[in-house]
Amino acid sequence: MRRAWLALVVPFFGAPALFASSRAFADEPIAASEPRLLDETAEVTSVVDAFDRDNPFDLHISAGFIQRWKRADIHRETELSQPGLTTGGFVANTENVAKYMQDLSILDIRADVGLFHDLALIFRLPVILSNSQSMEDLDGSTKNPQRLQDPTGAQLFSVPFKSPTRSGIDYFAVGLDWAVLNQQRNYTKPTWVIGVEGRFGIGDPLHACNATSGTNVCPNPADHTQTNRSPGVSRAMYGLDVKTVISKRFGYVEPYTGFEALFEFPRGDSDFGTAVNPQDIKGALVSTPPIIGTFTLGLEWIPWERREAFQRLVFDLRLQGIYNSPGRDYSELFDALGSSNAPTLTQPNAGAYTLGSGGGSVVDKTVPPVYFTGITDQAAFGAFSAAASVTWQAGEYVKFAVGGGVRFNQGHTVTAADPCNPSFTPNAGTAGPCKTTNNTLTGIPDPNYRAIIDTPGRRFSVDNTVIGTFNVSATVMF
């Protein structure tokens, strides 16, 4: 029993022991009254394999349900000189706009197929059962609708606001997991898994919609008189997810750590890539979604096992740090801004400028105009999450898991485009409005920039974001 308590302490104060060559005690009974332990690796580093010992083929099929609740405050910057807001020309982001709410339900279907020793082919299909979003009053914000007006007096959007409830398939994923090292095969080594997953957006692309009146109004960005576009359900991305996880078991506990990165590339038929908002326009400072990096530190505790019955109980505790790089994305205001009828958002921006016959800068008619779709440039932000789960392996062929977690996002600006792109060397024709008062050229215009939402003093931000998650799954193992 003394060694069991030591096993709880050592992983936290002796992390270097992950790489030590001393023998693990996963298969060493301490006393006759204590259970004998299974030699399987942690759930997080478990890889289905094949052609191993007397087991030529492995197949695991899982079905899980994920429920996510997201709550956030939406604020807007102001340059108004009012008590408690700002003075002296400084910009404050203290104007309340709305309380954002999202409820998301997902059915996650997965199959792990063993290919060879410690090598598995993985298929995943997350099915969105329901994705509902809305905005409500935030501490009296609805009493001041003028803060959401553009210079023409038109409303950018109104609160309360409701998005259509979406459902369907976002993407299909295929991946490979490989246990480079496996503690089951060599007890002097940790278990180290590397994996890669390709994601293929297959659902209808998201389109900005307003369902506040009970009827979906989904305008075409190029012609707002057409309002019958499908709301869509998919982010319409091709994704590449890479990960690495390492763990080492010490008696009743197995600490682990890992890193994961997700890269996404928009589909050509989405509002990211069509002529409505082309990706290849020169002036765009940002044209792709954020890169998301996640660092994980966790611990699995196995308090009970029965080797002869293939049964065990596993508790998993993990902490994660997440970084979202700057990028264009579907923000909390995607539907509200993208379905707006305000002229400052519905009028297209010039795709490029060129030298006119009079020597000045004029709109280049050979480059298509850029319409606003609701997708915006967003600033980088960090996040922190904590999660816990319980896995019960009921026998040789079935196991169940249940868990939950909470995540906190750092406040960040969600309308953060810059007016000019200094990466290109401008001339009198291509610079357009990108010049100082003394006619110094500062770059070429970014067609994604919208002064009404991207100018300091008018930008929107999302703060106090809390995301709660509950998940349950069942796995059949052949």
Image (tube, rainbow, N blue to C red):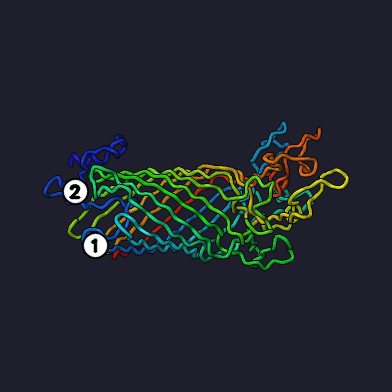
Compute the Cα span from label 2 to label 1.
Answer: 20 Å
Where does the image place residue 144, in percent across and percent down from the top left? Answer: 70, 49
Q: Is residue 397 above or below residue 136?
A: below
Badge 1 crowding class, 10 Å Cα cut-off, few under 14, some 14 to 19, many 20 or more, is: few
**Residue that extends furthest to the left in the rendered view of this protein:** 32
Is 429 on the left or on the right of 78, as rendered?
right
Instruction: Name the spot of residue 88 as percent of width and height, x first.
Output: 72, 31
Precedes in sequence: disc 2 or disc 1: 2
Observer able to see residue 453: no
Does residue 296 show up?
yes
Number of numbered discs = 2
Q: Quadrant of the N terminus?
A: top left
Identify which amino acid the numbered label 1 is placed on. Answer: Asn
Figure quadrant of the C terminus: bottom left
Q: Secondary structure at mark 2?
A: loop
Amino acid carrying label 2: it is: Asp
Above-or-below relation of 454 to 197: above
Residue at x 25% of width, y 58% of height: 52
Of the numbered discs in the image, which one, if any, rests on residue 238? none
Comparing 137 with 195, the one in front is 195
Between label 2 and label 1, give the one nearer the viewer: 1
Residue where numbered disc 1 is placed: 55
Looking at the image, is 125 positioned above or below residue 150? below
Q: Which residue carries the number 2 mark? A: 27
Q: Position of residue 384 (x, y in %)?
A: 46, 43
Residue drawn at (41%, 64%) of the image: 109
> Would you identify the image quadrant in which residue 93 lies?
top right
Q: Is residue 475 above or below residue 354?
A: below
Q: Is residue 109 left or right of residue 279?
A: left
